[in-house]
Image (spheres, grey):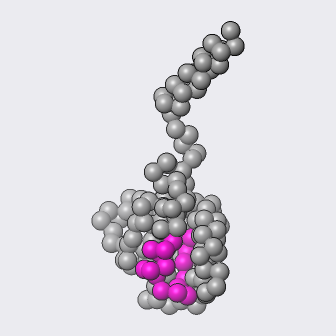
Amino acid sequence: RPWLASFAALALISAWLTIAEPDRNNIPTARHSRHSMETGIAKLRAVIPPASVFLVERETAQVLQYYLDRQLSSSAPFRIATSKPYQWRDLEQFKGDVAGARRKFALRAEEPLWIVDGGWELTIVSLLRNQTPGLFLPAFHNFDDTLIVFQTPPGV
């Protein structure tokens, strides 16, 4: 009875898809859509002036490179400084990356440096707010949890 075995396999697969734990290495389903990223990039372009400097970790750099190259191929893109770590997990590393980006693009302390975090985990805001509860993040925008954008906070 091959049809019975096929039916049992189909029932087992359907049940597994319903009850299985989601893979934590995947971007959550609510944030995993091309439309959300394209909307986030469009909002990013509307909020941040052209030729502004972004500081991103390598994970976000890959995402931005893909989507910005697709949307900005005929116009001047943002200037992007990429940190060494794949994701920010350490606040001291982040502060060093901020200083390095300011040196690289000759930005004075009062000039805006935009932080963009996207991809699998959005970590930098929680790192900053865990160290300084209630920290004000200038020009903070959360684009449907696909991208988080803000200017460097005072003292960073």
Q: Which residues are magenta?
A: 41-57
| Residue 121, visible in the rendered structure | no
Residue at 50% in and 48% down: 28
Placement of 59 over or under 153, stated as above or below = above
Q: Please provide percent x and percent y for residue 125.
A: 43, 63
Placement of 103 over or under 28, stated as above or below = below
Q: Most extreme residue toward the right, as rendered?
A: 2
Q: Does the segment drawn in magenta span residue 127?
A: no
Question: Residue 57 lies in what quarter of the image?
Answer: bottom right
Q: Which part of the image, by quadrant, shows the C terminus?
A: bottom left
Q: Please provide percent x and percent y for residue 6.
A: 65, 19
Q: Does the segment drawn in magenta span residue 50?
A: yes
| Residue 110, visible in the rendered structure | yes
User: Which residue is at the front of the view, 33 or 106?
Assistant: 33
Residue at 68% in and 9% down: 1
Q: How many marks?
A: 0
Q: Please provide percent x and percent y for residue 60.
A: 58, 65
Question: Residue 110 lies in what quarter of the image?
Answer: bottom left
Q: Please provide percent x and percent y for residue 2.
A: 69, 13
Q: Is residue 44 left or right of residue 133?
A: right
Residue at 52% in and 67% down: 38
Q: Most extreme residue toward the left, as rendered?
A: 134
Q: Is residue 155 left or right of residue 107?
A: left
Residue at 59% in and 23% down: 10
Placement of 106 over or under 137, stated as above or below = below
